[in-house]
Amino acid sequence: MASLMSRPLPVIRLIEDEGSSLISEVYWPDSYLSNSDTPRYEVINLEPEYDSTQEEASSSTGGTISGPIEGILRHFRFLNATVISPFKVRDYLYRYPELVELLEYVVQKVYDHFNSDIQLSLEMYHDKETLYESLILYIRQYEYSENIMNVIKEIRRGYRQKFPKNVGNFLLTTDFHLPG
């Protein structure tokens, strides 16, 4: 009669790296493996994919905020914009979902005023001393005109008038970096 041996389950730890990717660190506490203490690493993607059926279903059941948030993040990927620390950006948008409509408005105005060879970068700013947080959308170009800040200020005035009661902090600006 054969006997069954149970193998121990792997120990898995999730680690967030600098680029906001999650890495799973797997240890197999198995005496049959020659190097059981050597971790094995694997990059995993835990970012949910946008599903239009989810948005349709949620709108028919009273609505949720996940459809529009995932939709705007998908739109940024479509525009080849960068989203630095996407988990932090997503978390902030879930805390302040009214920023989704403002982002849609601002992106449209940016493309109305600038040609298509710009790059957008959506990032979180966090001041550790004051705990101030803000979502920042940077405009980056290969060649900057002298009036770029005037155009940005005009767009800012427009969104402050259209969205005066936003709870979350948002800023459109440039850092004069080249697209990258």
Image (cartoon, rainbow, N blue to C red):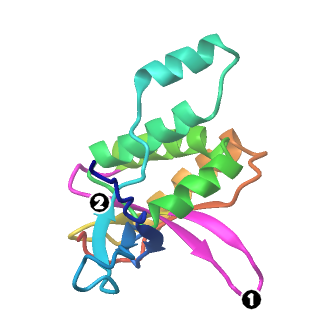
User: Which residue is nearer to you in this view: 66 or 3?
Assistant: 3
What residue did someone put label 1 on?
Answer: 129
Q: Secondary structure at mark 2?
A: strand
Residue 119: assigned label:
2
Q: Which amino acid type is marked by label 1?
A: Glu
- In this picture, which residue range is highlighted in magenta? 114-136
CA–CA distance in space, label 1 to label 2:
30 Å
Q: Are marks 1 and 2 in contact (CB under 8 Å)?
A: no
Residue 147 in view (yes/no): no
Q: Position of residue 8 (x, y in %)?
A: 42, 66
Q: Position of residue 15 (x, y in %)?
A: 45, 74
Q: Nearer the viewer, mark 1 or mark 2?
A: 1
Q: Secondary structure at mark 1?
A: loop
Q: Residue at x 63, y 56 (%)?
A: 92
Q: Is residue 112 above or below residue 178?
A: above
Rendered image quadrant of residue 119: bottom left
Rendered image quadrant of residue 112: top left
| Magenta segment includes 161 | no
Residue 92: assigned label:
none
Rendered image quadrant of residue 161: top right
Q: Position of residue 152 (x, y in %)?
A: 48, 60
Which quarter of the rendered picture does the C terminus lie within? bottom left
